[in-house]
Amino acid sequence: MANFTIADIKTLRDQLGTGMVDTKKALEEADGDLEKAVEILRLKGAKGNAKRADRSTSEGLVTAKEHDGQVTILELNTETDFVAKNDRFIALADKVLEAASAVSADSVEAALAAPAGSQTVAELISDEAAIIGEKVELRRVRTLSGDSFEVYLHRTSKDLPPQVGVVLAYTGDDAETARSIAQHISFANPTYLSRDEVPEADVDKEREIVTEISRNEGKPEAALPKIVEGRVNAFFKQVSLLDQDYAKDNKQSVAQIAKDAGLTLTDFARYKVGA
């Protein structure tokens, strides 16, 4: 009988995030030698990476780092929440973030090509996925520039790492209000900073849709322009941060809150795991 205990299985699973059956088999093959079992699991995982290529990665974390007048934010995904909260996966995210921020990565491709020690980030992720035993995927990454930043990382569960991350770039001195607006972004999920950034084609499409809806509702033709514009404005309040009603005071817009606080919002990013 192999010389290992339940505690050894738990230690290895906590270290690698591997499944119970695979961990037990590896310890049996290694005759209880933990280091050898790690190598066995790594080799097995490397062979399994290709088989996992089509698997869904709906769990993971969001993390961010401020550096040299910039902030890099990224989302790293895996298959299960068991791995997402594993120390090894969290450490991998830290390494990926360090490498991505060092090159101010603004795309997944740039981040994957970034050096991480003696290998690239892509190679690092592949090696760690082999050990962890699940598909690991860098889903998105962005680097923002600005005068000041507020980074807000939100845990949707106390047992998991942050699932929602917001970076808000701004000018001004009211850090407390900036943080409140970052929290608003995490909740309200705007797509654009201002209505000027919304693609004209999207606005035209929305106008067509609400015009058709208004006609189907039997609205008078003479009243349609005013009704349609009102509904288009409602669309802007959904997608444009500055147009949104402020979460803590829906009688004011985010634009008004920022102005009263002496803030100019210049950019933002919001990531939510799996969304």
Image (cartoon, rainbow, N blue to C red):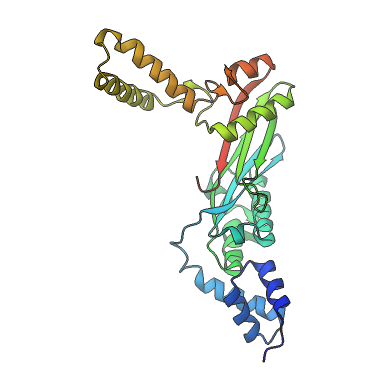
**Residue 119, located in which quarter of the rendered image?**
bottom right
Q: Nearer the viewer, residue 119 or 47?
A: 47
Task: In the displayed orientation, state which residue is furthest to the top.
Answer: 222
Residue under the point 50% across and 31% down: 191
- Whole-percent x and y of residue 38? 66, 75
Left or right for 176, reference 58: right
Q: Nearer the viewer, residue 23 or 204?
A: 23
Residue under the point 59% across and 60% down: 125
How many marks do you count on the picture? 0
Task: In the displayed orientation, state which residue is furthest to the front.
Answer: 218
Residue under the point 48% across and 21% down: 195
In the displayed structure, 224 sits above or below 18; it is above
Q: Quadrant of the N terminus?
A: bottom right
- Whole-percent x and y of residue 24? 62, 79
In the displayed structure, 139 sits above or below 153; it is below
- Whole-percent x and y of residue 12? 68, 72
Left or right for 32, reference 215: right
**Residue 126, located in which quarter of the rendered image?**
bottom right
In the displayed structure, 261 sits above or below 180; it is above
Q: Nearer the viewer, residue 124 or 271?
A: 271
